[in-house]
Image: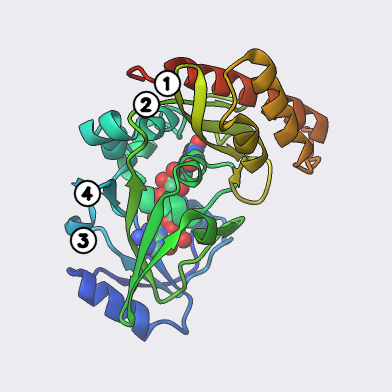
Amino acid sequence: MKPAPFDYRRPATKAEALRLLSDHRDDDAKILAGGQSLVPMMNFRMAQPTVIIDINLLSDLAFVEERGECIAIGALTRHNDVMRHPLVGAHVPLLAMAYENVAHHTIRNRGTIGGNVVHADAASEVPAVLTALDAEFVIESTEGVRVVGADDFFLGVFTTAVETHELLVEIRIPRPNARAGVSFEEVSLRKGDFAIVSVAVEIAADDGQIESARIAIGGVEERALRAEAAEQALVGASLSDDVIQAAAAAQIDAISFFDAPGLSAAYRRDTAKALLERNIRAAAARAGRMN
Ligand SMILES: Cc1cc2nc3c(=O)[nH]c(=O)nc-3n(C[C@H](O)[C@H](O)[C@H](O)COP(=O)(O)OP(=O)(O)OC[C@H]3O[C@@H](n4cnc5c(N)ncnc54)[C@H](O)[C@@H]3O)c2cc1C
């Protein structure tokens, strides 16, 4: 299939991109970043934008930087550049771990973190990590800048807080507690596929006592789910297998799992429970040490 006809714009500056987005706010305009999700959707005619605004000349939107208590990542940073960046390895190892499961090398060379999160596939790994880590999203338009937390950014399947006249410019991830251990794992049909279920865990513990727990589950609801029931069961508890199993069970009881063709709700529930227990255990074992 070939896409429906569209106008093509390639702004050289962010200001020009924002102006184009504003001018075309009532047309069906779409940003083109890596094109790894948008172009297939256009080829299948699931998306038929009338104007494409290609942001690939905006190299100032491709960066990974230390910003006080945050690691800031530009929206146009390619997946592989995020995954391999030393700051990400040192301060956001959960993201680097999750990226091992995102698509394939060639797709990660072109796809961007901004495109990934705005595409907002419910089974995507990066949104699960950013939900667990309380990331913030910097969104710009000709009307100004706003900063939105993960809970208000991911709204549902293929839906985020970014409006048609807005550009996601940056993602800010707070540095984790220095005593934190992390773990990410997913079950998918084949390596490189979207997850059936994924679990991202960051746990800080001191002397066997759990200080903090940040956990998200992908693939079980319309957006990555913050595992608040499990977090509450863990924080303040002494680490033991009984505590981990009770935390996972409390979380699983709080989710309404859905049936999908070839994939029963029971399978998804059992997978989520097993992944939760395994990743809480692995993150806790790493807490207080290098990941
Ligand atoms: C075979 C295959 C396997 C894949 N497997 C996985 C996987 O396992 N896990 C996974 O997470 N992803 C997977 N992907 C998707 C991949 O990660 C994409 O790169 C990503 O989802 C989209 O990023 P992009 O830069 O290519 O965005 P594009 O395709 O260019 O854009 C995607 C959407 O985001 C919008 N957009 C892009 N950038 C901005 C911005 N800065 N501000 C506002 N709107 C913006 C676009 O308008 C469009 O609506 C796979 C893709 C393929 C082709």
Q: Residue at x 21, y 31 (%)?
A: 86
Q: Seen in the image, is 81 located left or right of residue 42?
A: left
Count all numbered tags in the image, as a single digit. Answer: 4
Q: CA–CA distance between discs 4 and 1? A: 23 Å
Q: Amino acid at mark 4?
A: Gly
Other-residue count near label 1 (Cα within 10 Å), few / some / many at <14 / 14–19 / ≥20: many
* Residue occupied by mark 4: 68
Disc 3 element: loop
Observer-nearest of 284 and 61:
284
Whether residue 62 is visible here, answered yes or no, is: yes
4 or 1: tag closer to the N-terminus: 4
Task: Name the front one of labels 3 and 2.
Answer: 2
Disc 1 element: loop
Observer-nearest of 145 and 241:
241
Q: Which mark is residue 58?
A: 3
Q: Residue at x 50, y 38 (%)?
A: 125
